[in-house]
Amino acid sequence: MIDLCWRLALKLLKTVLIVASVILQCMILPAWLLWNSILQPILIHFISICFFAAYLTVYFKGHVLKKSYRMSVYLYGLILFVFFPGFGWIGMLVIILMSGRLSQSVKAGLYDDYEEYITEQNKSAASLESMSVMMRKARREISFEPYIDIINGNDERSKSKVIEKLSKIISHNSVMLLKKALTDESSDIRIYAAGAMTRIEDSIRDKIRLVQHNVMRIGTPDEYFDLGDLLSMYAHLGLLEEKLENYYFNLSLDAYRCSLAQDPAKPHAIVRCAQCLLDLSKYEEAKELLNSAMDILPDNEEIMILRSKVYFRMNNFTEVVKCLRNIKMNMLGEEQKRIVEFWTAIS
């Protein structure tokens, strides 16, 4: 409450200072015409500059100057203000309005580009990364200020916009950024972040209920597969405690098994089912499932790579090399190629 009152008082003070400064600027010409002397307009102009300087001092007190483009904008505005009495404030106002429009356009592009990035990351639900690893990876792949830097910054307005965007993106990365926002100094940002996480959880739960209804009504392999994906995604989001995560991994595993019971040769269901077994540390079951799958789909690269992961978790590095040796490199992404080249070079 004290923090809110203090911020309101600062806003009121800034408003009074800038309004007083502009009013004094508007009085310069009437003062010159009234007194037919330059002394009074100079005095009024000097007082107006003092008010404007006080406004800038209060404004930038709560900002990190090296990261604020507004510092340069107001500096140019101050030059106009000082050297063009009576009219400089109009030029300053134009500069500020134009810079604000430009800033909004840049940020809008930033939000959209990063939303596309984070959505792409969500395609691999099995890829879990710690917050620090995720942040480093994002910085490598994006050449401009991402959501991460906004969350770590001091601009509450930008943070609230980012949090609103993240609340609509159901992904592990979104939750990690919102958890970071939960540690923010501002109580308002912490409340926004908590609300955003609640909306993400409500959204994924609604999707699960809808698909569960379809499963009970239709029960096709695809419906079970979709249900398994949603349950697995919920477990991977980072919203749940470990016991609840395992509970939803088991539910996801049951859904994938139901899908495979109706369509045993469904490659994606085999992979997802094996991944769930990995998440639950059931390595032997995962190995048996994938070995059986190789009899049906001997050339499936995704199954081969997942088999290598299972053997890696079991510390059977000889089998890891055997699994990766026959993979066709042209079907892999760059990161997967590096992994395969590393292990095959060992042999």
Image (cartoon, grey):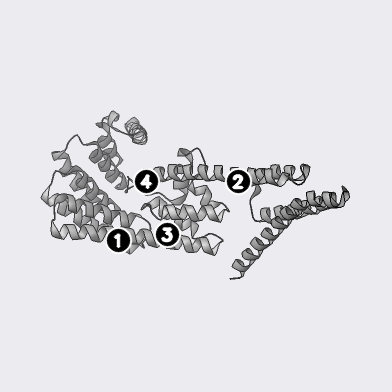
Q: Quadrant of residue 343?
A: top left
Furthest residue in direction bottom, as rendered? 1
Q: Are marks 3 and 4 in contact (CB under 8 Å)?
A: no
Indicate which disc, 4 or 1, sits on the residue closer to the N terminus: 4
Question: What amino acid type is highlighted by mark number 2?
Answer: Leu
Q: 100 or 269: which is nearer to us?
A: 100
Question: Mark 2 or 4, which is nearer the eye?
Answer: 2
Picture coordinates of residue 273 (x, y %)? 22, 50
| Residue identified by numbered label 3 | 196
- The answer to whether residue 26 is above or below residue 305 is below
The disc placed on residue 147 is none
Identify which residue is drawn at 74% across, 51% down: 26
Question: What amino acid type is highlighted by mark number 3?
Answer: Ala
- The answer to whether residue 152 is above or below residue 302 is below
- Disc 1 element: helix
Picture coordinates of residue 158 (x, y %)? 52, 52
Question: What amino acid type is highlighted by mark number 4?
Answer: Thr
CA neighbours of label 4 inside 10 A, class few (<14), some (14 to 19), many (20+): some
| Residue identified by numbered label 2 | 97
Question: What amino acid type is highlighted by mark number 1?
Answer: Arg
The disc placed on residue 119 is 4
